């Protein structure tokens, strides 16, 4: 392994902290009215998000100084622990139900979402597998099937919660990693056809998923039901115009857009800060992905490269899906916008993942 550099990628640190700062400001702006009504404290969500951010930043800087090969050593143990937590969350009395999904385990006054941490655990385990078996990845039976079997086992358990959004991000991230590792395109085409058939089956098996698809195609067909969130999101983005209505001046956060501090926070950002503000956030994400790809290309070994690609792929997929949903380009799924949306598990996981990237950057040659 190459000699470790004295400093990590400072540009990546600045970009991450910039996104986190924007997120803290927007969580308060988006949630103040709802928090005042529900908890009589306009800072309720902002204070909790600040706490999550503090824990996440500490985790990021701590992990930044942990040799990324540690994740290879402990990958099996970590993924087993995450599988156990995924199973525990399904047990009544252990798992907490929110918005129809049993995805959380209560820890004191807070809650943990195991499926979020499974994403990073799966990335670490798959990076280890691919780095040790890259020559076999072109073989469907010996390379592709074993790598995807574990991924879809985890996906199946996550779907029992159910949490299609998180499961989709995990599977998409793993497919990106396997493709980069050199899997044959013909195998992906065949699996893609099976995946589409399975995805259609998942949609048809649950009436609420069918409504989400139909509302995506024509939200005005059911404006007070399945199309409500998309319509209210577009009503937020449209009036924002070029420069926005001004920070704190959103109209849709006045109980029109449900819990706007979570999955639809980008709509409130676009309403208040306009096209300029929305584009600035997307620019920050683009810069973050650019730095991540540079780190992956410069990593001194295959494990570091695959690990970095997995983390960057996870962030990119979540951003694309979240912004696509908010702008009406994709069906509604429960996926947070990294570093911006309210949520302890998601925010902590993302900052920890950046910490891994920063450690790889200390060895990268670029």
Image (cartoon, rainbow, N blue to C red):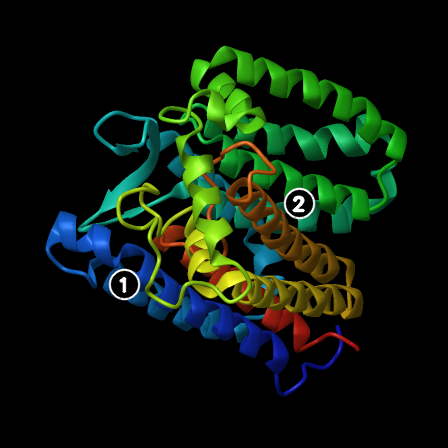
How far across and how far down the image is residue 146, in percent? 71, 31
Q: Secondary structure at mark 1?
A: helix
Whichever of callouts 2 and 1 sits on the residue coming sooner in the sequence is 1
One can see residue 147 in this view: yes
Mark 2 crowdedness (10 Å alpha carbons): few <14, some 14-19, many ≥20 = many
Q: In which quadrant will I find the N terminus?
A: bottom right
The relative height of residue 167 versus residue 74 in the rendered view (above or below) is above
Q: Nearer the viewer, residue 334 or 305?
A: 334
Residue 126 circle label: 2
Residue 346 circle label: none
Q: In the picture, residue 365 is in which quadrant? A: bottom right
Q: In the picture, residue 184 is in which quadrant? A: top right
The relative height of residue 139 versus residue 261 in the rendered view (above or below) is above
Residue at image mark 1: 46
Q: In which quadrant will I find the C terminus?
A: bottom right
Relative side of 241 to 102, left or right: right
Nearer to us: label 2 or label 1: 1
Q: Residue at x 81, y 47 (%)?
A: 181
Q: Nearer the viewer, residue 152 or 1?
A: 152
How far across and how far down the image is residue 359, in percent? 60, 72
Q: Residue at x 49, y 35 (%)?
A: 333
């Amino acid at each position: 392994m190459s000699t470790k550099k004295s400093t990590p990628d400072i540009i990546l640190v600045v970009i991450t902290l910039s996104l986190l700062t924007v997120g803290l400001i927007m969580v308060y702006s988006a949630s103040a009215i709802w928090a005042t009504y529900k908890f009589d404290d306009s800072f309720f969500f902002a204070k909790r998000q600040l706490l999550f951010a503090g824990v996440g930043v500490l985790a990021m800087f701590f992990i930044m100084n942990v040799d990324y090969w540690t994740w290879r050593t402990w990958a099996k143990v970590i993924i087993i622990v995450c599988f156990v937590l995924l199973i525990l969350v399904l047990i009544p009395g252990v798992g907490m139900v929110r918005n129809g999904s049993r995805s959380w385990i209560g820890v004191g006054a807070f809650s943990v979402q195991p499926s979020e941490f499974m994403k990073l655990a799966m990335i670490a385990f798959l990076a280890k597998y691919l780095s040790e078996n890259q020559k076999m990845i072109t073989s469907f039976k010996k390379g592709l099937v074993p790598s995807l079997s574990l991924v879809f086992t985890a996906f199946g358990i996550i779907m029992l919660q159910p949490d299609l959004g998180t499961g989709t991000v995990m599977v998409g991230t793993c497919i990106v990693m396997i493709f980069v590792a050199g899997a044959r395109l013909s195998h992906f085409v065949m699996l893609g056809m099976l995946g589409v058939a399975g995805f259609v089956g998942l949609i048809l098996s649950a009436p609420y998923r069918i409504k989400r698809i139909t509302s995506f195609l024509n939200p005005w067909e059911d404006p007070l039901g399945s199309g409500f969130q998309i319509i209210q999101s577009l009503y937020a983005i449209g009036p924002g115009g070029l420069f926005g209505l001004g920070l704190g001046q959103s109209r849709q956060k006045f109980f029109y857009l449900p819990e706007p501090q979570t999955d639809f926070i980008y709509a409130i950002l676009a309403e208040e800060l306009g096209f300029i503000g929305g584009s600035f956030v997307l620019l920050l994400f683009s810069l973050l992905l650019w730095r991540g790809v540079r780190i992956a290309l410069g990593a001194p070994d295959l494990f570091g490269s695959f690990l970095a690609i997995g983390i960057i792929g996870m962030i990119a997929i979540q951003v694309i899906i979240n912004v696509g949903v908010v702008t009406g380009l994709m069906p509604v799924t429960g996926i947070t916008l990294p570093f911006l949306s309210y949520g302890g598990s998601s925010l902590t996981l993302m900052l920890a993942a950046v910490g891994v990237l920063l450690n790889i950057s200390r060895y990268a040659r670029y």
